[in-house]
Amino acid sequence: MTPLDLPFITDEMLNGLRPWIETESPTFDAAAVNRMMDLVQHEMAAMGARVERIPGTMGLGDSVRATMPHPRAGQGGILLLGHMDTVHPVGTLAKLPFRREGALCYGPGIMDMKGGNYVYLDALRKLQDAGIETPLPVTVLFTPDEEIGTPSTRALIESEAKRHKYILVPEPANLDGSAVIGRYAIARFNLRALGKPSHAGWALADGRSAIAEMAKKVAQIEGMTTDDCTFSVGVFNAGQWVNCVSSVCDAEVLTMAKTQELLDEGVRKMMALRSDSEDITIEVRRGVTRPVWDPDQPGTMAMLSLAQDIAGEIGFEMTGKSAGGGSDGNFTGFLGLPTLDSIGVRGRDLHTLNEHIFVDSLVERARLAAGLYCRLEA
């Protein structure tokens, strides 16, 4: 039996994936993320892996690193890199339950990126069951904080990745099924407007609204967007009492740029928004950053060529391109390590209450995973 002939069964894979989706794991709920890590840790231990639990920092969840069984286990080889946190808060299952409807399967985090993580782990399980040994040893690293820019595990990811020859990141595939071989740069910013409080009915003119000032900045910030450098205000928090002129307003901004030079210019524009007057102050603090991962690196292109050959044997076409939407592949690609990203399941509407995958992509991507594990060589 060849790796591409392994007995992947759709219903069996959906049954295995269901507990992952029903174990909700939003980034900021460390206990929930750790329940997900408990689940995957148990599964990998059952596969005979040497599993390490790495305690979380910054109030975030733990990471799990597993050294899969192999004669050279622990040596550098292939790193399967994925995150187990999602953007969906606990309770989302009430609105977005795990369910299959014909060719689609729904659930929080099923596309980004539990579906891909499950498929690539299941491929290892099926190879093991068939007695097929991969040429290179495989290490799995699942982390808890990718959805907020990986502030607590970037150093862990980079340190682990440097030990390996190849990095596989099963983030969801692009809509056309293509893989990612480069990513744009991303920076996050925290803004705070400080105004002057007053009673909104009795002394409105005495106050200076932080909400009103921040609203002006939102229009200004999003107006700076171009095709090559975008600005988006994704969080806006202020106010406690409607009869009070707000004195504090907080916002968070995401900037994405196709080149490092464009990102640097975007950062300068954002930092220039800082101001301080007698009545209103605007504070701007730079948050986490994902560096540009330049495409067309030789090692990555060789991995893409191999994936294209495997895809052709399976019966689908795979292209590769640079893309927006940061991932932990930014870090490994930036380091120049051969990295193939967005090779996970296909689907639509990630980060929404309609998040779903195309069911036929489960077996398709499992066969791709098995092929990659068995053809990536020293």
Image (cartoon, rainbow, N blue to C red):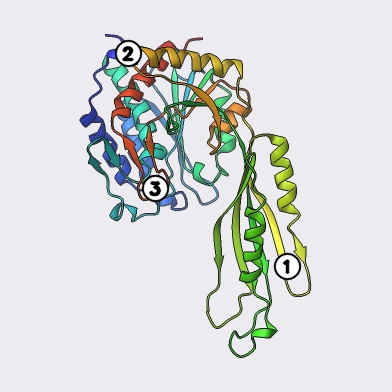
Q: Which residue is mark 2?
A: 3
Residue 200 lies in what quarter of the image?
A: bottom right
Residue 16 lies in what quarter of the image?
A: top left
Q: Which residue is mark 3?
A: 25
Q: Which residue is mark 1?
A: 281
* Residue at point 59%, 36% (across, down): 155
As measured in the structure, the alpha-carbon distance from the residue carrying label 3 to the one carrying label 1 is 36 Å
Q: Residues within 10 Å of mark 3 (few under 14, many from 20)?
A: many
Residue 314 is situated, as x and y percent measured from the top left of the image, at 33, 15
Amino acid type at circle 2 is Pro
Q: Earlier in the sequence, mark 2 or mark 3?
A: 2
Q: Earlier in the sequence, mark 2 or mark 1?
A: 2
- The answer, for residue 71, to whether it is visible in the render is no
Amino acid type at circle 3 is Ser
Q: Is residue 61 above or below residue 104?
A: below
Amino acid type at circle 1 is Thr
**Badge nearest the viewer, 2 or 3:** 2
